[in-house]
Amino acid sequence: MDKYLFLSDLDLTLIDRDYNPTLPFEAVRAVSRGVSDKGHQIGLISDTAKATLEMRRRQFGFNGPLISERGALVSLPDGNSELSAEMAIDWLVFKQLVIQSLEARFPGVIILEEGYLKLKRTRNDRLVFLNDKTNLIIVNPYRSYSFSFHVNQFQNGEITQNSEFYKKIVDVLNDIVIEEYQPFVYQDANPDYGVVIYTEKQLDKSLAIPIIRKYYPEHTLVAIGDSQGDAVLKGHVDILAAVGNASPEMKKRADIITSGEITHGMLEILEIFVPQVREIRAKF
Ligand SMILES: [Mg+2]
């Protein structure tokens, strides 16, 4: 029987805009257990950091490898890791440059290096000293081969989006990310999320696939995603699947398009290849 390795994107493939699955965690965990009981594996392939993917793997009960930071790092379930390319940038230096420049350009801004979701959960204890309408930059502390931050405002005891401040930040970033970095960095500014992500220009998710093939020579690779960043996997994996909410470009390149969106769509793919889990999901 064929062994499948499913590689799922995270944002808008497995979780929604609020970072939640569209089905209960128990449902995903139960289906995931059914898939692994049949000898298949489910891994994650995302632009985000390894630590974030490890947390998601635990939450969803997945058993497969993690590909993080836009294909930069492949982490196997046994704990071994491999980089898919030699990095062109010292990301620690880059991070310090951007943080120090933002502090200089925006006096009074508070820059915190914290897990965004964790900070949102514990905001009242941690941010109680802040004045109302203080601008916040929340730097992702978990990245090693990329750099990202959320642009927010502290208002009425909540962390909220501030699109005006976000626009100002994005406007000055080109001055900050000086010429010597321009040929090597790729900037992904997403106002919907209030987030700015920098990764290496040389990278995309497909660079990780040869490493995956080395460790999973017998497996059929099925990738599931929603955006252009996933569409590049066409021709590298065996089957490319798009969730129902995927972008038109991704749908055009995909071999399969699900009717369900986000988590529903992702589980639909598992059910197509592992029909035994249909019954499990029907219980939820
Ligand atoms: Mg996505």
Image: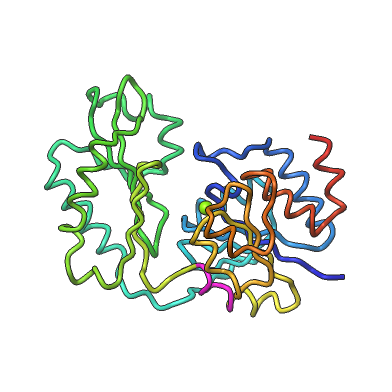
Residue 209 painted magenta: yes
Name the image quarter holding the C terminus: top right
Question: Residue reaching furthest top?
Answer: 156
Q: How many numbered circles are shown?
A: 0
Q: Nearer the viewer, residue 108 or 281?
A: 281
Is 241 located above or below residue 207 in the figure?
above
Q: Is residue 1 left or right of residue 100?
A: right
Q: Is residue 188 left or right of residue 47?
A: left
Residue 198 painted magenta: no
Q: Nearer the viewer, residue 255 or 200?
A: 255
Name the image quarter holding the N terminus: bottom right
**Which residue is painted at 46% across and 69% down in the image?**
204
Is 238 located above or below residue 128 in the figure?
below
**Which residue is painted at 64% across and 80% down in the image?**
214
**Residue 246: x %, y % from top left:** 56, 51
**Residue 12: x %, y % from top left:** 55, 47
Is 45 located above or below residue 183 in the figure?
above
Q: Which residues are magenta?
A: 205-210
Q: Nearer the viewer, residue 45 or 145?
A: 45
**Which residue is painted at 58% across and 74% down in the image?**
209
Q: Main secondary structure of the magenta part?
A: helix
Way the structure is coloured? rainbow
- The picture quadrant where one finds residue 110 is top left
**Residue 34: x %, y % from top left:** 82, 51
**Which residue is painted at 32% across and 28% down in the image?**
127
**Residue 125: x %, y % from top left:** 37, 26
